[in-house]
Image (spheres, rainbow, N blue to C red):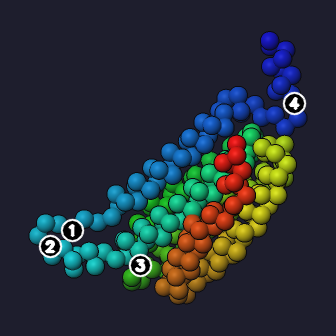
């Protein structure tokens, strides 16, 4: 029994981590992080006090709601793309574990950067706050694309031979969004409102994009 286990651990491409933390546990952990992050986002929204006029108070809080919408849409698209990744992945290895954890690190940072941008969207601190927020979105997006690029390079971890092409297509389609996200970060140094417009466009791009993974969705129904 022990000899068989040793033989399996020496198999090329075999990850010892998969015995310690199976792929389904990693996916469950990722789903939990996404859910907690979205919950924290909504808890940060301001609630007008009882003595305030409700409508003016809500209108005054427009930066908070704008930042919430951008982050919610971004995280929603991020989660759907990650779900597509897990559908095509049969095994995990040390690299995918670490890449996923690094991705979740930047995703979990979003409630802070969202609140930072919302609180300083207007005024002298707008350049820095919008820049920090954009960098968080950018690095998280790059890390997710890194997972797809790595899995395309390791076809033995995938469910079948077609998955490699799916990953390459998914990663290629995300590049334009990442490029525009980078442009938004640069704009934050000079024109924060223009950067916000770019962030909104990129967030909705990443949210809509998973719906075009038709072959992945079709194959998931057949499994």
The quarter in which the C terminus is drawn is top right
Up the image or down, 102 lies above or below 114; here it is: above
Q: Which residue is mark 1?
A: 48
| C-alpha distance separating marks 4 and 1 | 60 Å
Give the mark nearest the N terminus, 2 or 4. 4
Residue at screen point 39% across, 82% down: 122
Depth check, front residue: 222 or 167 = 222
Give the mark nearest the N terminus, 3 or 4. 4
Up the image or down, 159 lies above or below 150; here it is: above
Q: Which residue is mark 2?
A: 52
Q: Which residue is mark 4?
A: 11
| C-alpha distance separating marks 2 and 4 | 67 Å
Residue 17 visible, this orientation:
yes
**Res 106 label:** none
| C-alpha distance separating marks 3 and 4 | 53 Å
Residue at screen point 45% across, 61% down: 112
| C-alpha distance separating marks 2 and 3 | 23 Å
Q: Which residue is mark 3?
A: 121
Up the image or down, 104 lies above or below 193; here it is: above
Horizontal arrangement in the rendering, residue 151 relative to residue 39 (left or right) = right
Q: Residues within 10 Å of mark 3 (few under 14, many from 20)?
A: many
């Amino acid at each position: 029994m022990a000899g068989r286990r040793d033989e399996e651990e020496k198999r090329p491409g075999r990850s010892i981590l998969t015995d310690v933390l199976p792929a389904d546990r990693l996916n469950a952990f990722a789903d939990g992080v996404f859910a907690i992050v979205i919950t924290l986002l909504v808890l940060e929204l301001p609630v007008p006090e009882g003595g305030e006029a409700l409508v003016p108070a809500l209108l005054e809080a427009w930066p908070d709601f704008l930042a919430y919408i951008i982050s919610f849409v971004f995280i929603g698209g991020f989660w759907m793309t990650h779900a597509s990744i897990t559908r095509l992945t049969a095994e995990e290895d040390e690299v995918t574990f670490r890449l996923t954890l690094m991705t979740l690190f930047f995703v979990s940072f979003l409630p802070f950067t969202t609140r930072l941008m919302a609180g300083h969207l207007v005024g002298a601190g707008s350049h820095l706050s919008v820049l920090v927020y954009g960098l968080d979105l950018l690095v998280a997006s790059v890390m997710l694309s890194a997972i797809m690029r790595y899995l395309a390079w390791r076809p033995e971890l995938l469910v079948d031979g077609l998955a490699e092409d799916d990953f390459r297509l998914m990663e290629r389609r995300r590049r334009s969004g990442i490029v525009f996200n980078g442009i938004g970060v640069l704009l934050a140094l000079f024109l924060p409102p223009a950067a916000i417009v770019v962030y909104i466009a990129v967030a909705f791009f990443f949210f809509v994009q998973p719906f075009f993974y038709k072959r992945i969705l079709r194959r998931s129904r057949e499994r």
